[in-house]
Amino acid sequence: MNKPMQGKVALVAAASKGLGRAVAFELASEGANVALFSRNGQAAIDVAAEITAETGVQALGLQADVCNAEDLTRCVEETVREFGGLHILVNNAGGPPAGTFETLKEADWQYAFELNLLSIVRLVGLALPHLKESGGAVINLASSSIKQPIPGLTLSNVMRTGVAGLSKTLAEELAPHGIRVNTIAPGRIDTDRVRSLDQARADQAGITSAAYKVKTEAVIPLGRYGQPEELARVVAFFCSDAASYVTGQSLLVDGGMVKSL
């Protein structure tokens, strides 16, 4: 039985766990061959093996740091060499350190820029010649902060908003090549990153992390945190031919948490 993404090749950044891992699995379940990378190379190799065992498609695990230009160059080259092309690029990276404007140092700003914005600039540039050939899709994972800044996450608020601006610009510039570019913005998705932030806020409030989660869930219309697989299914839709007329969009996957229009 043919799958909708059979014959396509996807490269997923920061995919040894969390959102990236879920996206890599979902794209593979739709039939795409998947290359994925992580700073922990063995973890990426292990996830690739799990993907192949579970879905039957070919998967390639690579070691790379999104802040290292040479690593990113090697990842794109090895992906194309292994699979013969590239159709889908999913840009993802961990969040920068928490902090308010007055607590952050210039080095923190530089790190956040390289982690969450420059990494996307680099990867899109490296993938672009191959995406032009395939008329592919680019998905940039950001944050609900592109619509509503999150207190205490100054760096993320700024850099993720920059990602949304970059996506919108690229969508127009790359459309003549048949390349679609969209931003997916998660809200409270149950990942290690969110659990870590919850624990820090719970400590500040003098309550347990479980109590903080209950308090947060109370302001989410759907009444719960999302699961990585739920976001991954949205990413897969935007990568698929079903979304062939969708580009330049920023979509919140947040259970209705953000109230802005």
Image: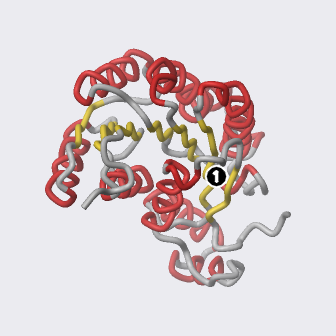
Residue 222 location (% of width, % of height): 64, 82
Residue 252 location (% of width, % of height): 67, 60
What count of labels does the image hold?
Answer: 1
Q: Which residue appears at 67% of the width and 37% of the height?
A: 163
Q: Which residue appears at 62% of the width and 63% of the height?
A: 253
Identify the coloring. secondary structure
Mark 1 residue crowding within 10 angstroms, few (<14) / some (14–19) / many (20+): many
Q: Which residue appears at 26% of the width and 30% of the height?
A: 83
Q: From the viewer's perspective, is residue 104 above or below residue 230?
A: above
Q: From the viewer's perspective, is residue 72 above or below residue 227?
A: above
Left of 255 or right of it: where is 80?
Answer: left
Image quadrant assignment for residue 134: top left
Q: Which residue appears at 72% of the width and 46% of the height?
A: 157
Residue 88 location (% of width, % of height): 45, 38
Q: Nearer the viewer, residue 145 or 27?
A: 27
The residue sitting at the right extreme is 261
Residue 166 location (% of width, % of height): 70, 32
* Quarter of the C terminus within the rendering: bottom right
The residue sitting at the front extreme is 1
- The amino acid type found where label 1 is placed reads Ser
- Kind of element beneath mark 1: loop
Q: Nearer the viewer, residue 225 or 210?
A: 225
Q: From the viewer's perspective, is residue 199 above or below residue 66?
A: below
Q: Nearer the viewer, residue 48 or 64?
A: 48
Q: Which residue is mark 1?
A: 143
